[in-house]
Amino acid sequence: MLLKHTVYSVDTVVIGAGVIGLAVARSLAKSGREVLILERNASIGQETSSRNSQVIHAGLYYPQRSFKAKFCVEGRRMLYQYCRERSVDVQQCGKLIVATSEASFRDKLVPLYHQALRNGVTDVKLLTDTAHIADLEPHLSHVVAALWSPSTGIVDSHHFLYSLLADAEAHGATLALQSAVEDSRITNGVELQVGGMWIACRNVVNAAGLWAHQVASLLHQNHPWQPPKQYYCKGNYFRLQGQISPFSRLVYPLPDERGGLGVHATLDLAGMVRFGPDVEWLHENIQPDEIDYTMGSWCRIMPVFDPS
Ligand SMILES: Cc1cc2nc3c(=O)[nH]c(=O)nc-3n(C[C@H](O)[C@H](O)[C@H](O)COP(=O)(O)OP(=O)(O)OC[C@H]3O[C@@H](n4cnc5c(N)ncnc54)[C@H](O)[C@@H]3O)c2cc1C
């Protein structure tokens, strides 16, 4: 925590110690900049970066030549290499995207296969031999075809986050926890208010995740700025308790029309399986006590996975 009544001055402040903030801080510190990371929580990676599927995506889905397609394919290679070099737990288990009808095979799976090839993901294979698919994953049912992506994998996200932090700190970056940015003012550079004190800096990186809009509004106080509209969405995960995963690969349905990749079976590095996330759009000013945390959407999984 930063001490009150002290005036700090630093070249660059990174707001947020999720995976984005830590990766940016690492990179800036390695390039020789003086970096201070401000995180409002008591430890790093407590928000979206530790509440996800931990999947290293191959880059199958995104529109050709989009930044997402480009960065996902390049980033996946870099991430595997980084994990190998830094001994971060990772497993290139591959993933199957399954079609459960001839129509979805023809109209969705085949186009997805071509999309993947256009994005430079050249190791994908269309599997149409259902006996072969059953050999690979005997617990799948109702599958008529599958797209096999061998370069998809899983990573231990906590291990990865701490490795990024260690790199950043080894290059001189400083992490301040319980240090929420509450206000800002423009002087020669930017001053940020944290717990009643002001930090002067020349550069600010806003890596505040779901709160990036709020932080951006603080930074734009003196300039008219219309933040992009936010659309909130909730995803539930369901854990198969007390059982090692029946699957040895990630298993995905075809992408969900409501958004998202569809409720998928995600393995973790301990060999357990979770199903999720499903997709539940929330209204703009949703309050936490309005959100339904029950398991009502379990039935959405059933068309693809036999829950027995
Ligand atoms: C359900 C789900 C599943 C996903 N699965 C995958 C997956 O399998 N693979 C994949 O690659 N991606 C996945 N993603 C996406 C990925 O998790 C996110 O893109 C990524 O974690 C975003 O990281 P971030 O650093 O931007 O945000 P965050 O992890 O949210 O970090 C932002 C940080 O900023 C801090 N902060 C906020 N406001 C302030 C403030 N005022 N002052 C100081 N600190 C502040 C927060 O406390 C937080 O620590 C998934 C996302 C979701 C929602």
Image (cartoon, rainbow, N blue to C red):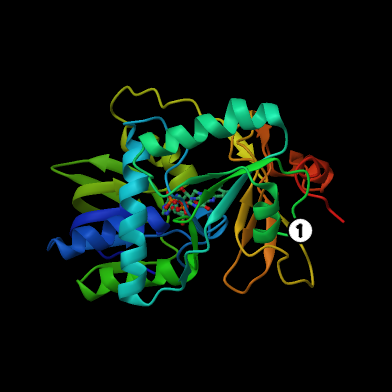
Residue for point 77% across, 63% down: 240
Left or right of 99? Residue 126 is: left
- Towards the viewer: 212 or 260: 260
- Towards the viewer: 74 or 48: 74
Instruction: Give the residue at the far right of this rendering.
Output: 308
Asked if residue 2 shows in the view, the reply is no
Residue for point 41% across, 73% down: 88
Residue indicated by mark 1: 139
Residue for point 20% across, 48% down: 203
> Residue 31's x, y, as percent?
13, 61
- Towards the viewer: 181 or 30: 30
Residue for point 14% across, 60% down: 33
> Residue 142's x, y, as percent?
78, 43
Left or right of 296? Residue 173 is: left
Left or right of 233? Residue 174 is: left
191 is higher (above) or lower (below) than 272: above
> Residue 30's x, y, as percent?
17, 65
294 is higher (above) or lower (below) than 164: above
Badge count:
1
Query: On the rendered image, what quadrant is the N terminus found in?
Result: bottom left
User: Ligand 1 closer than 8 Å to the CB at disc 1?
Assistant: no
- Callout 1 amino acid: His
Quarter of the image where one finds residue 108: top right
Quarter of the image where one finds residue 98: top right
Query: On the rendered image, what quadrant is the C terminus found in?
Result: bottom right
- Towards the viewer: 120 or 18: 120
Quarter of the image where one finds residue 213: top left
> Residue 244's x, y, as percent?
72, 72
Local packing at callout 1 (Cα closer than 10 Å; few below 14, some 14-19, many 20+) is few
Asked if residue 185 shows in the view, the reply is yes
Element carrying mark 1 = loop
